[in-house]
Amino acid sequence: MPSSHNPAASLAHIVANAERIDLYVAGMDKGDFERNRLVGDGVERCLERVCEAVYRLGPRAETLMPGQPWAEIRGMGNRSRHAFDQISHEVVWATVRYELPELEAAARKAQANLELGNPIA
């Protein structure tokens, strides 16, 4: 059953929050990130939004952005909402540095495809 949410809006949320995260952590290394709880809290909130946007894409996510670790992304969203006290700063940092850039690039590509009128399954 397709989601009732607008896929273009969900993709825009992914891109916008990834951009915010990039801005927040600019010039930081892992140690800086772990020491700066204000930035850490902002990054975690933006990641929650990214995960919610992915959730809102529903089954269209795989069609729009194939090859992403969808279960892990949705799982991170669930953990950030329900097990927030068990979130590892190391996992957040690794996600931001190594996984989020690929998701952001895929979301940008999907946005371009939507603008060109490519159909969504």
Image (cartoon, helix red, strand yellow):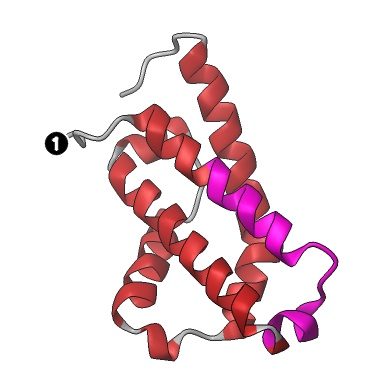
Residue at the front extreme of this rendering? 38
Please tell me which residue is depicted at 44% across the width and 9% down the height of the picture.
Answer: 117
When the figure is inspected, residue 91 is found, relative to residue 74, above or below; the finding is below
When the figure is inspected, residue 1 is found, relative to residue 20, above or below; the finding is above
Label tally: 1
Please tell me which residue is depicted at 64% across the width and 48% down the height of the picture.
Answer: 19
When the figure is inspected, residue 113 is found, relative to residue 72, above or below; the finding is above
Side of 89 relative to 74 (left or right): right
SS at circle 1: loop
Please tell me which residue is depicted at 81% across the width and 72% down the height of the picture.
Answer: 28
Residue at the top extreme of this rendering? 117
How far across and how far down the image is residue 75, in percent? 36, 68
Q: Quadrant of residue 35?
A: bottom right
When the figure is inspected, residue 14 is found, relative to residue 36, above or below; the finding is above
How far across and how far down the image is residue 60, in percent? 33, 34
Q: Which residues are magenta?
A: 15-34
Tell me if mark 1 has few (under 14), some (14-19) or many (20+) residues whose alpha carbon lies within 10 angstroms of its own. few
Q: Which residue is mark 1?
A: 1
Side of 109 relative to 82 (left or right): right
In magenta segment, residue 23: yes
